[in-house]
Amino acid sequence: MDSLTFLSKMPKGDPPPILVVHGEETYLRRQVLTHIRQWVLPEGGDDFSLSTHAGDSVEWATVHGDLETRSFFGGRRLVIVENADPFISANRSRLEKYVGAPSESGVLVLEAKTWRSTTKLAKLINQKATLGCKAPTTAKLVEWAQHHCLRSYQKPINPQAARLLVELGGSAMG
């Protein structure tokens, strides 16, 4: 799923047990992670229900333990592996098994720069749970700037000003 589509409205229902946020656009990845946190941990959640790990140093046992541990205050736990490319490479077979029998108490989010859709792991994960964060085209970026100004700051911006903003600021969303 495209990240801008995901960000346009809050998803309904329960989140899937595993989500993948991937792409080169760092700003979009951060926005998607914030949106996921609001979805999985409604009403701000609590810090006891959230675990964040660095993908280059975390072990599978730590992540799996967090996913299997029930939240202290009830509800789901959200476990995020940031910069997960090395974690995915090192634990691909474990992740494939996990997708087949996920935890009922936790939601795993893998945040990676690259995600190859041809791998067995990618095929096991629902495409709606895979959120691509690539820089939008200039036309979409102008439209996004207009919506973002209105939604975030309650200030409308006309199309010419948004186009100028994109021309001057470049294609990096941050």
Image: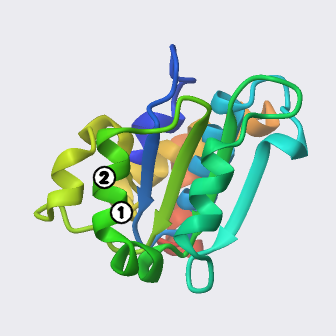
* Image vertical order of residue 122 relative to residue 166, above or below: above
**At 89% across and 37% down in the image, what residue appears?**
46
How many tags in the picture? 2
Give the image's coloring scheme.
rainbow
Left or right of 169? Residue 13 is: left
Q: Amino acid at mark 2?
A: Lys
Picture coordinates of residue 111, whole percent (x, y): 51, 63
Picture coordinates of residue 76, whole percent (x, y): 68, 30
Would you say the residues marked 1 and 2 are in contact, meaning their CB atoms lie under 8 Å apart? yes
Which residue is identified by label 2? 97
**At 49% across and 59% down in the image, what residue appears?**
110
**At 51% across and 45% down in the image, what residue appears?**
144
Picture coordinates of residue 146, whole percent (x, y): 58, 41
Left or right of 4? Residue 60 is: right
Q: Amino acid at mark 1?
A: Arg
Secondary structure type for disc 2: helix
Picture coordinates of residue 62, whole percent (x, y): 65, 65
Query: Which dot marks residue 94?
Result: 1
The residue carrying pointer 1 sits among few (fewer than 14), some (14 to 19) or many (20 or more) residues within 10 Å by Cα, namely few
Depth check: 11 or 58 in front? 58
**At 53% across and 48% down in the image, what residue appears?**
108
Secondary structure type for disc 1: helix
